[in-house]
Image (spheres, helix red, strand yellow):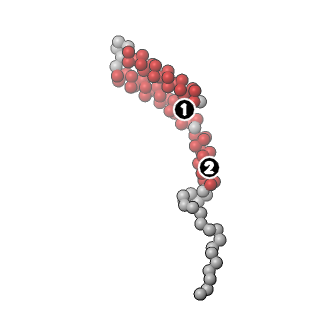
């Protein structure tokens, strides 16, 4: 997935440079090309990495079931002594 993403970014950047160096090319055209070229990649990566985000969240909740973020206390109360 990483190599496809790198290739996609490379193609979009080269296309934007071609847009900039064209006789009628503008900076606005370059920005639109970059945004519209990278937006689909962002959506695809977000969807593709959703499973790993869910897996990490499940592992974190399994390690910390109360989700309080505090260290667990003693499971057994200390023995109280009478004075």
Q: Which residue is mark 1?
A: 44
User: With 33 as the anchor, is 57 left or right in this view?
Assistant: right
Image point 51% across, 29% down: which residue? 41
When asked about the image quadrant of residue 19, the answer is: top left
Please provide percent x and percent y for residue 36. 44, 26
Q: CA distance from mark 2 to mark 1?
A: 22 Å
Image point 38% across, 25% down: which residue? 31
Please provide percent x and percent y for residue 17. 41, 19
Query: Which structural element holds mark 2?
Result: helix
Q: Which residue is mark 2?
A: 58
Q: Which residue is more in the foreground, 70 or 42?
A: 70
When asked about the image quadrant of residue 23, the answer is: top left
User: With 62 as the anchor, is 12 left or right in this view?
Assistant: left
Closer to the chain start, of discs 2 and 1, is 1
Please provide percent x and percent y for residue 16. 42, 20
**Quadrant of the image containing the N terminus:** top right
Query: Which structural element holds mark 1?
Result: helix
Please provide percent x and percent y for residue 39. 47, 30
Callout count: 2
Q: Give residue 35's mark.
A: none
Q: Residues within 10 Å of mark 1 (few under 14, many from 20)?
A: few
Residue 27 versus residue 62 in the image, above or below: above
Residue placed farthest to the bottom in the image? 83
Residue 25 versus residue 38 in the image, above or below: above
Q: Which residue is more in the foreground, 40 or 22?
A: 22
**Quadrant of the image containing the C terminus:** bottom right
Residue 79 versus residue 62 in the image, above or below: below
Image point 60% across, 56% down: which residue? 64
């Amino acid at each position: 997935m990483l190599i496809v993403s790198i290739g996609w970014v490379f193609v979009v950047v080269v296309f934007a440079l071609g847009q900039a160096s064209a006789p009628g090319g503008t900076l606005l055209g370059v920005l639109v090309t970059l945004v519209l070229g990278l937006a689909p990649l962002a959506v695809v990566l977000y969807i593709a990495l959703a499973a790993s985000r869910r897996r990490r969240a499940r592992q974190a909740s399994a390690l910390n079931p109360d989700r309080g973020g505090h260290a667990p206390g003693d499971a057994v109360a200390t023995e109280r002594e009478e004075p």
